[in-house]
Image: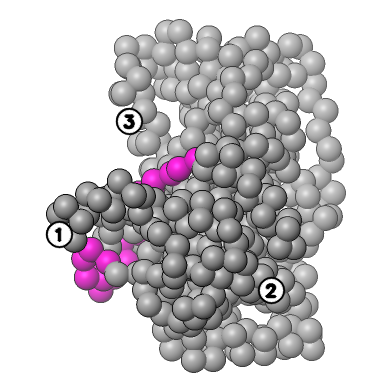
Amino acid sequence: MDETRPLSVGQESLWLLHKLAPDSAAYNLAGGARMAPAPDVPALARAVRALSARHDGLRSVFVEADGRPRRAVREPDHDTLDVRDVPDADDERLWEMVLEVTREPFALTEGAMPFRAVLLRRREDAAFLMVTHHIVTDATSQWLLWRDLIAAYEAYATGGEPDLPPVRASYDDHVAREERLLDSPTGERMAEHWREVCAAAAPAELPTDRPRPPFQSFQGASVARRLPDEVAERLRATAALIGVSPFAFLLGTFQGLLYRHTGQPDFTVGCPASTRRAAAREVVGYYVNPILLRSRFARSTTFADAAVAANHQVRRGMASAAYPYPLVAREASGPLFRIAVTMVAADRFGPTLERAVAGEVMYVAGRKMSYMEIPHMEGQCDLTVEFTQDASALVTVFRYDTDLFDRATVERLLDHFVRLVEAGVADPLTKITRAPLVSAAERQRLLAMGT
């Protein structure tokens, strides 16, 4: 193990959150794949070792020195893959075990590394899982890990060597760059921008099913919906017509949904922004910094208005995205956001992963392989909305705090969002307050109930 290294401000914040709730898995990032027949275990174990050797964040351990957390990097471990034979597990029991593995907290304060790779092996097939803590990875890192793992396994299983792009930077470069920013006029200008955004700002607050507990437990769940293909296609066309990205249109529509449900004309939401530079394209690390998006609505606001405003919010926010959000939050008297919105473009990670996210079956070294969509990172906020887009599909996931919301409430909220998207792409000049939130059949049902 080498000498200790400083953390980024965001990592220090995640360390503090972990110490406050060490039994929570809210910051676990998880992915999995079903493989049939079961994989070549020596080749898979070798691929996992190669992954760990390539990305030192996976071998990090965290310690405190002079009251501040730091990280040290261990030498690559030859027993990184955990193989568990479960020959008699049916599909239901296998899924239960998948959730057990992915929801097991990392004992970071006890010197545990923030990475686990587990193979649940049945007689005819297996489930392979990779779980990391957010303190060393982000969404892009997860896809890098899967790309590297698939390439390494396929090479080793067929007697070859993986051909991967070189890693030319390190996460320590990012930490050093952040330190220089905070000690510069540019950093001060960014800080002033966020002070202006935060002035008299209030976070969007949805009505909850239960009172907010005095302490956040970080327990959550999620619901997901794939937009109909024709709606996703019209969304892209409508966004292009208005001159905004599909994400800006979805964000503006979701902010309109919040306006409809909260009655707040002026509110903030968070949006995780990537601080990853081109030089770090191959680095696994925590390159995430939330930015605050402040929106203002009136009864006359149209879908197009909301999309253009959202696009402007994102552009302004990204110009100051390198300034660490935890430092902004320290100056605030209360929470700056309770709801977050993000988008993942799966088609950025190559055709193999794009097909996987789309649910297609792939063949890797003669094994049938299909990606498993595993719920994770639930309960961080009241509500986190994630849009995942590939070349054809667009999936919306609502992750929610189960201390506050019932599943039925969040499913209804997601239904309302889909209705608004359909209305917005049909006519972007429609006022958001005039668009129906429920279908005609649902409206008749509610009227029959006297609602």
| Foreground: disc 1 or disc 3 | 1
Dot 3 amino acid type: Glu
Q: Position of residue 68 (x, y in %)?
A: 54, 72
The image's colouring method is one colour
Tell me if 170 is positioned left or right of 381 in this view.
right
Q: CA distance from mark 1 to mark 2?
A: 42 Å
Look at the image and say whether residue 239 sits in the magenta stretch: no
Tell me if 24 is positioned left or right of 197 in this view.
left
Residue of label 1? 450
Q: CA distance from mark 2 to mark 3?
A: 43 Å
Q: Which residues are magenta?
A: 208-226
Q: CA distance from mark 1 to mark 3?
A: 41 Å
Can you tell which quarter of the image residue 212 is in?
bottom left
Residue of label 3? 96
Mark 1 vs 2, N-terminal side: 2
Q: Position of residue 110 (x, y in %)?
A: 43, 53
Dot 1 amino acid type: Gly
Image disc number at residue 312: 2
Dot 2 amino acid type: His
